[in-house]
Image (cartoon, rainbow, N blue to C red):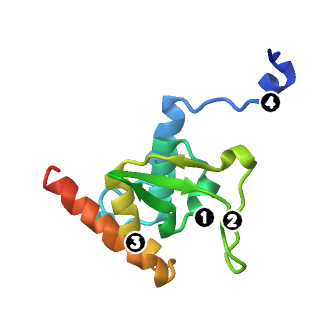
Amino acid sequence: MRLADPEKAKRRRPHYDESDLDKIFRSSRVDQSARPPRNRDEWFWLPLWGFLTGARLGELGQLWVSDIEREKDAWYLNINDEGDEGNPKHLKNAASKRRIPPLANIAVGYFKSSAMLSLLSVGELMTVAILREQSATMKNGR
């Protein structure tokens, strides 16, 4: 049996309310709804992914295309600390390593974004073809 830690409850951050979310998503930097999805940058995609998945922005910002994985017909984000020497990844703690099922259309739009594609290595871009296939499948209703 575990007892609640009263000090931990005091340290908890308050949740965002509707007004907070409105300020974030309607800010001039984040609201890029007038742009085509391919031209939206990380200021649009990262807060949206954070909102939809509950992942921390720092975790999302260090994702590689290869961290979008597919198991059978299910796509997910693999939040991990498996970086390399030139591109290390860091997690807050061991429990932060996890798989998050994303909304497939959000994933496809994010990685088709020209701003993000320019940040990825050529080897990583091979996964984009898989995401395009998934997008076409979704459009065809399968």
Left or right of 67, for residue 90: right
- Comparing 91 with 110, the one in front is 91
Mark closest to the chain's N terminus, 1 or 2: 1
- Comparing 36 with 141, the one in front is 141
Residues at marks 3 and 4 touching, judged by CB atoms closer than 8 Å:
no
Q: CA distance from mark 4 to mark 1?
A: 26 Å
Label 4 element class? helix
Mark closest to the chain's N terminus, 3 or 2: 2
Crowding near the residue tagged with mark 3, few <14, some 14–19, many ≥20 C-alpha atoms within 10 Å? some
**Total marks placed:** 4
Residue 89 numbered tag: 2
Percent from the top left, x then y, of residue 13?
Answer: 71, 32
Location of residue 61 with respect to 3 vertically, above or below: below
User: Hey, which residue is sitting farthest bottom in the picture?
Assistant: 122
Residue 11 numbered tag: 4
Residue 127 numbered tag: 3
Q: CA distance from mark 3 to mark 1?
A: 16 Å
Q: CA distance from mark 3 to mark 4?
A: 40 Å
User: Hey, which residue is sitting farthest front in the picture?
Assistant: 72
Please give the name of the residue rendered at 67% of the width and 47% of the height, measured from the top-left corner.
96
- Comparing 99 with 50, the one in front is 99
Mark closest to the chain's N terminus, 4 or 1: 4
Which residue type carries mark 2?
Answer: Lys
Mark closest to the chain's N terminus, 3 or 4: 4
Which residue type carries mark 3?
Answer: Thr
Residues at marks 1 and 2 touching, judged by CB atoms closer than 8 Å:
yes
Q: Closer to the observer: label 3 or label 4? A: 3
Residue 22 numbered tag: none
Circle 1 sits on which residue?
Answer: 62
Percent from the top left, x then y, of residue 30?
Answer: 46, 55
Q: CA distance from mark 4 to mark 2?
A: 26 Å
In which quarter of the view is residue 128 placed?
bottom left
